[in-house]
Amino acid sequence: MKVLAIVKTELTRTFRWRANIFFLLIMPMGLILLLGVAFGNSATRIGVVEKEKGQLASQLVATLGNQPGLDTKSYDNLGSLERAVERGYVSAGLVLGSNYDQRLQAGKAVTIRYFARPDSTAPQIRVALESSVAAQGSALVAARIVHSEQGRSFKSALRRVNAVKATAPVGVSLLAAGGGKYPTGGGQFQQSASTQLLLFAFLSALNGAVWLIETRRLGVARRMLSTPSSSREIMLGIVLGRWVITLLQAAMIVFFSWLIFSVHWGDPFGTGAIILVFSLVAVGAGVLIGSLCSSAQQAGPIAMIVGLVFAAIGGSMEPLQYFPATMRKIAHITPHAWANDAFGTLLSNGGNLANVWLDVVVLGAYAAVLLTLATWRLRRVLTT
Amino acid sequence: MRATLLITAKDLRQRLRDRSAFLVAFVAPLALAFAMGVTISGFSAGGATYQIGVVNLDRGQAATAFFSTAEQAPVQLNTEKNAASARKRVKDGKLDAAIVLPRGLSATFLGGPAVQIDVIGDRNNQVGALVARALSDSYASYARTIQLAARALGNATSSLQIAQKGSSLRSPVAVSDTSTTRKNLDPKTYYAAAMAVFFLFFAVQFGISSLLDERRDGTLARMLAAPIPRRAIVGAKALTSVVIGLTSMVVLALTTHYALGAHWGNPLGIGVLIVCAVLAATGVTAFVTTLAKTQEQANAWLSMVSIILGMLGGSFFPVAQAGGVVSVLSKMTPHAWFLSGLQDLSSGEPLSSIVEPSIVLLAIAAACGALALVRVRKLIEP
């Protein structure tokens, strides 16, 4: 009962300022939703300059734009395309020369210029471009062979090839490793909502460190100790209070992303378990920092560094799937990586609690270690 | 003036003593620039190789052709025993994707029935799946080319003979990839700069927001009782912010240049941009501080404002790609202007290209600074 009273005090102190509601709950959620609008279902964009809108050139651009996850955007000249790539408005640029159609129709080779931003989408775009080029090349290469075998002009060879009734001798189908068809689309937001949830829940729970120092500085903790309540009850109250706040934040993100963007959060038990343990890990880390630092000026930056660095390494800024293999292993020193893995299984592979039990156990171990250290340290700080 | 300098010197000494400024201004941005560097930019264009498993159920000549079409792609092909083991290795993350070459693939070149290549991808590794799929698509185009040619030539030449033509089967369209030779702002420099400007907003807090500390601890009242004009006190706090901000940015630029190999570009242009960014950060921070009543409120609000501005301004995500509302909002952040000025400089644009970003940064500084000046009077009333 006393524990609940302490939890209530913590909550009252936090939300007495309306501004805290805005800054701790509404603003992170707003940002996640905003990024959702921005990146929601957007494809990777490739800027294209077609110096002459020939039939073949347009065909290549259309094929490229039809590739899964890619979109093309037209630019007037090289200068504006280069600027767009530099500024990151598009991920890559493609320049088709003015004689593209003319040379290809005449059976000659052409070179198209391509440049990409050095980011994680670059290899994907490059391979997609190669396959679009290959698709367009089919008829042209066949015509070249007919031209060299039969000695007729390239133009008539191309006519002959185009007249041939073609079937697709080899088809390609994409299957999911877990069985069934590979999902197309679904949107990046599906993934970004869960990774952002982890980033913000962790960051704001760590900021609880500043709050804890404030509790110590104002003497709230000492006054609680002077009442007939054990230090265990007090610490339980403090930890629970922070936990409730973190869970509130997570719940709001889950609810509104579902309401507004119909982000689907998978198995409620699995997702619930991950959010519960992950929040506990975050609270443990926050209380530990709060008990190790002596001033809010120290705790604030440390919480920020730990929160952002862990998020970056743990795949909450750039998805883990883009990491090089070694980096992906190293990432698993952070709780984020485990939680992100679990969300991957739950949200995109339709798993349930049984599929993520290992992640839950690992996160639980993190929470146990951090909370043990934190309460041990906090008891010393509070009682001596 | 003397009073201003005295207070500034006192503030700087205080911040040096509790090491907090050191953490925010140097350790944090370097740690994060490094973390972002190894995760995000650790694999620049062409740097990543995808591990793709190939299950060859065909055992004919078709597989050889398949391997040769994949020569150009950023992949490493590993032969797998059967589809089940490949599927498992994809699921376990050992392979980025797997490709199953079906029985009868070679036979299609002899007029056999159409077959299907299965690409096995993991839902959590979409890039790997798309790369494997694109590879297979390229191969399907190759098969189609041969079929077209064979049919156009009639029965005179068999598909197999055509398939043996090797290099003459290459598409007439060559892609010349000039990504690596371009003078883009490389990711290392981008994130070094992005983190520097992101933490700049935290570093400058030490000046202005310490007014709230001084008020709480009663030292503000004592300063007001002394023969010091109020202007001098506010000026000193702003000066502290500017000094910490400038030092942080300059040291970070030098450190990342020499230690991480970041290329910031023309020193004069960088200098101007840094000064403008520091002033803008000081202005924004001062304004938010004057809205708060207590130090902890100010801390919480400033953190949130800095994080939001940083995220919108492109410190963490490529916001520029988003378009729409977000790119408009992005243009309202000092971060976006600073970084775009830097991008222009590094891509070899003339020095005059930083005029626009500099003016916008100064305007932000002036607008927020003016609002802060109006509100700060309330804060330092005795």
Image (cartoon, coloured by chain):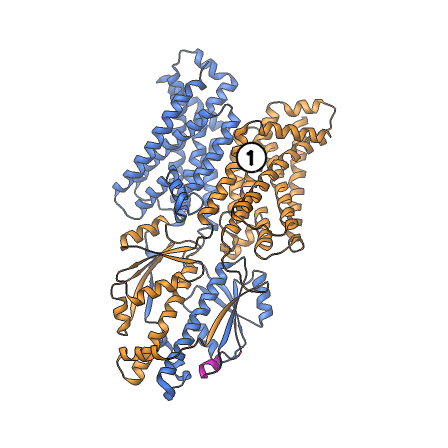
Which residue is located at x 35 percent, y 32 percent?
B364
Chain appearing in orange on the rendered image = A
Residue A72: give x, y in percent of width and height. Answer: 37, 57
**Magenta run includes residue A272:** no
Q: Classify residue A64 by image quadrant.
A: bottom left
Residue in front for this viewpoint, A63 or B240: A63
Which residue is located at x 62 percent, y 35 percent?
A242
Which residue is located at x 51 percent, y 16 percent?
B218
Q: Classify residue A222 by image quadrant.
A: top right
Counting every numbered tag in the picture gives 1
Q: Which residue is mark 1?
A: A207
B149 left or right, relative to B352: right
Residue B316: give x, y in percent of width and height. Answer: 45, 44
Q: Amino acid at mark 1?
A: Asn
Q: Is residue B259 above or below residue A15?
A: below
Image quadrant in which the N terminus of chain B is located = top left
A2 left or right, relative to B239: right
Chain appearing in blue on the rendered image = B
User: Where are the magenta residues, as a range?
Assistant: B101-113
Q: Classify residue B46 by image quadrant.
A: bottom left
